[in-house]
Amino acid sequence: MSTINDEKIDVGKTETLVYSAEVQKAIDEILPSDDPLDKPDFDTIDHINKLFPTEQSLSSIDDVINSLECKVDSIDNDIRSVIRGQIDVNKDGKAELEEAQRYIKHLFSQIREIKQKAEHSEEIVKEITLDIKQLDCAKKNLTTSITTLNNLHMLVSGIESLRGLTTKRKYGEIVMPLQGVTDVMKHFKNYTDIPHIAQLSTEVKQLQTSLATQIMADFREAFSGPNAKNFVPNRQMTEACLVVSILEPKVKDELLEWFIDIQLSEYTHLFDSAEDVAWLDKLNQRYAWFKRQLLQCEEKFRAMFPVQWELSERIAVEFCKITKNELSKLMVKRKNEIDVKLLLFAIQKTVAFENLMAKTFNGNTIVQNYEKSSNNLTKQSIINTETEDILQPFSEDLQISDALENMPSLTEKNEPKQNASPFYGLISDCFQPFLYIYIDSVDKNLSELIERFVSDNKITLAKENIDDQTASVLPNCADLFLFYKKSLVQCTELSNHNPMLALATVFQKYLKEYATKILEVNLPKISHPATSLTTNVSNMTKDLIKDLQLLPSGMTETSVKNINCTPQELAKILY
């Protein structure tokens, strides 16, 4: 609140207090009054003139004086009452303050007592919980000791029972104890520093090794022994496979590798590189033999091997690997005998077989083998390697032989695509290094096509008085681009790597020949010196060649298949 200005104005012998505007406003809000004596701008002379406006009114001056004196006495009485009341209020306030202080002291004392009792209760609870913690720790240790003793008893008894069952070859009864012993040994993994546990661990490993050796011997006896031809899958061999599933994974891998070699041994003899049936024209017989062999194997051994082993898929994968290696070696030896028809026939049959395998199997074993073999490789290093091997399309120094020499070895397969089956390319990749035969065939066909265009009757675009709007389109132009379209589609189905770049080089070569041997020879002769049709067509040809340079590297298989020979459609693809 603003301070009161104690400005004093002397009027005769009286003193008038003058308050600031803020204080006066507050007084008016709290004590509103219509009495002119309460106004801050009260003027004594004006007030007297209002009371006695005329001389006749002075006759009532005594009454006015008496009224004012009564009012003064009333105000004095009010002031005295307020002062006395204020004195009583001060006394009551002091008494109440002393009473409040007394209550506060009493409250503090109660809080202190509660705090002391809480500390005492906390100490009691700590003593109680200490005993509970000790009991809980003892219970936990006791439970662990009982569990460990039970596991130790199971381990010792399991080892003894396994020894007897192994000797008797009761594989069906071995499965449960062996699984139990294997699980118990995981519990004792942190106790191998104890001599007795270390000894038991050694005995378990010896038992597992003995079981693996014994089962392998049983399989060799069954499939390679004197009575191998008369062998019929029995319950003992099925139970032996269940035992192998519990042993280390390498035991199962060794058994499957040996068994698959047995199943495909006939294939390697029948289709030896020295046999006529091994050549590409008899490639379909390889796949027919495998289909029959796979059906026989599934019918005969389906119940013997566990489903999670995926035996049929493993046999198919191994067959594909053997076939790829054998065909690669054979084509290198007899590459002079390979023509484009034979090559395309072999690729067609191989791709059809891979599609069949992709529909039959999911390729889990291929992915697992890839993950094991690529632990030391990173995806970035693979991308960098591929980038260094890629050649720029339509380079002046790029030749077909150069492109195919730099083709990456297809034995170094990249990571399988997420949406593609791993079987795609498992065999057909061996044909990639020989796709230069297809490129050479396209080169030869284009050469013959250009020669046929040249030998045909030349079309006169313009004899005289002809302009650009009335120019005709060469009919052989549609034939050329139709051949380009078919070649692009076919090459996309075969490969979208360096063979596509080599094909682009061939396209560049014969576009230039077509421009020089066909277009320039048949350009119309016109007499317009300002706008030469020869210059316009030559520029258009150069622009077309530049645009086609981007076609193989930037065009997907879908866009290639959608090309039509009309100028409008071709313009949409190029631009």
Image (tube, helix red, strand yellow):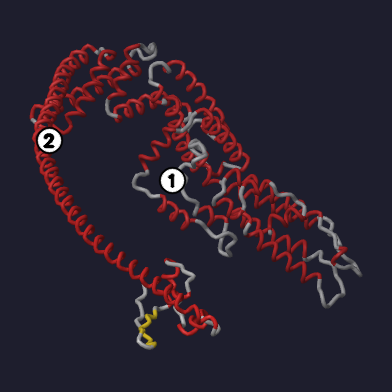
- Distance in Å between CA atoms under marks 2 and 1: 71 Å
SS assignment at label 1? loop
Q: Quadrant of residue 70?
A: bottom left
Q: Is residue 350 above or below residue 222?
A: below
Q: Is residue 124 above or below residue 524?
A: above
- Quarter of the image with the N terminus is bottom left
Which residue matches tag 1?
Answer: 412
Q: Position of residue 137 (x, y in %)?
A: 12, 31
SS assignment at label 2? helix
Task: Return the residue nearer the eye: 430 or 242.
Answer: 242
Task: Return the residue nearer the eye: 422 or 222.
Answer: 422
Which badge, 2 or 1, comes first in the chain's sequence? 2
Which mark's residue is nearer the viewer, 2 or 1? 2
Q: Which amino acid type is shown beneath numbered disc 2?
A: Val
Q: Residue at x 55, y 84 (%)?
A: 54
Q: Position of residue 79 (x, y in %)?
A: 32, 68
Q: Residue at x 47, y 72 (%)?
A: 35
Disc assigned to residue 125:
2
Q: Which amino acid type is shown beneath numbered disc 1?
A: Glu
Q: Position of residue 335 (x, y in %)?
A: 53, 43
Q: Judge the density around disc 2: few (<14), some (14-19), many (≥20) Cα neighbours within 10 Å.
A: few
